[in-house]
Amino acid sequence: MSHVRLGLRANFWQFSLLVVVNAFVGAMVGMERTILPPMAEQEFHLAAKTAVLSFIVVFGITKALTNYLAGRLSDRFGRKHVLVAGWLVAVPVPFLLMWAPNWAWVLFANALLGVSQGLTWSTTVIMKIDLAGPQKRGLAMGLNEFAGYFAVAASALATGFVAAHYGLRPAPFYLGVAFVALGLLLSVILVRETKHHVAAESKLHGELPPEGMLTQREIFWRTSLLDKNLSSVSQAGLVNNLNDGMAWGLFPLFFAAARMDLGQVGTLAAIYPATWGMAQLFTGAWSDRVGRKWLIAWGMWVQAVGIGVVVLSSSFVGFGVGGAILGVGTAMVYPTLLAAIGDVAHPSWRASSVGVYRLWRDLGYAIGALLAGVVADAFGLPAAMWLVAALTSASGVVVAIRMSEMPRQPGAPTLPEVGPARSITP
């Protein structure tokens, strides 16, 4: 145990490897962002927006539930085993999408993709938090989310380009085969277990006696509702992915309705996650210096503005500006939320708390897709997008009112007592 050291510099190569692995994780989602909405309409002749967005609902539910399990499984069996299992689940996905004879195959592929993303992305997040230690947690999450969402953008752009030249299927999904193969090989051969780093950090906080350990039920309710900081983070994560689910499903249709061709749609679909990804290189580290609360609140408000700009626009430039603003707002929020969970949760139950947060966050995909689809079918695409913008703004108000700034120094108190729960500090 004496050879284990915390920090980005001390774990540079392993941390960098995990950044690369998470890029392949993000690329698996990116290959769908340009292709699936037009594929639903053109190849499977789905007219109702609720039906078109059903693949996001399936993805969001399976990813959310798997996120919750990923935290618990990584505590029990180790991070690397869960990461490798996630890649194995992803192996059939590109083949199912390129050969799907009906929409049910697409839904099944997205169920597998959701499980895979829940296992792989959750585990890379947890492993980076393990390696980084308490001092540079925001920077670590910024690098992690940069890699994932910049890869989402690059993959969306690449699949849009391939589809514009070779058709919607099967060519764009050949990229997915390469992503799975490379991610799996790197995870099996080069990634190392990080649970030893958790034990080292626990000593900074003080080891918990057996009677002080939290149960899974206590962790769930603290993270979901009872603790003001953790529950504020959870609701903001849910609403953030609610608007991302809307953007994923409705933006390509909205752009197509404005007479953008498939290449332009692919470029526009990439601007939002590309801005989101690149800006996180700055915002994650920024949150280490200025704190988490107001970066989250203002990030939600900036996202609402970005959605509004998209709705009010009718040209490629306007859509691109709105997507970039949405990306900046999301970058302010995304790594900061994960870092905030790491600030509050004790290392001994942090992975489980991250799992609960990611459960709620990724349920936002399903809720956003359902809500946006129903409202779009009833009142049109702009009405659905305005509703999501309003919910995003309201989430920022909740953070501003309910959340307090959290201590981030090793050994500082991490949580106030909530109800009858047992002590979590030594």
Image: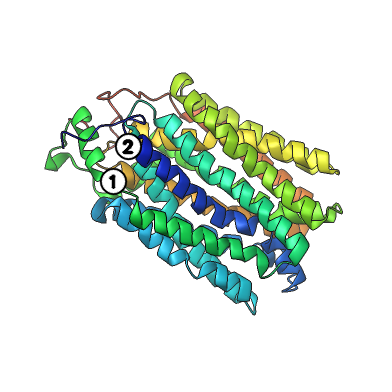
Question: How far across and how far down the image is residue 8, in percent?
Answer: 36, 31
Q: Are marks 2 and 1 in contact (CB under 8 Å)?
A: no
For badge 2, the amino acid type reads: Leu
Please name the amino acid that badge 1 sits on.
Glu
Quarter of image, res 329 = top right
Furthest toward the bottom, the residue is 101
Quickly name the residue at label 1.
218
Q: Quadrant of the C terminus?
A: top left
Residue 178 drawn above or below residue 319: below
Could one spot residue 66 in this view of the protein? Answer: no
At which x and y percent is residue 85? 37, 62
Image coords of residue 29 (percent x, y) = 57, 55
Instruction: Specify whether 58 is left or right of 15.
Output: right
Element class at badge 1: helix
Residue under the point 39% across and 27% down: 136
Q: Quadrant of residue 252?
A: bottom right
- Indicate the quadrant where residue 388 lies: top right
Circle 2 or circle 1, nearest the eye: 2
Image-based side of 112 in relation to 226, left or right: right
Work out whether residue 200 or residue 425 is closer to the camera in this orientation and state it: 200
x 22%, y 42%: residue = 196
Is residue 30 shown left or right of residue 162? left
- Residue matched to label 2: 131
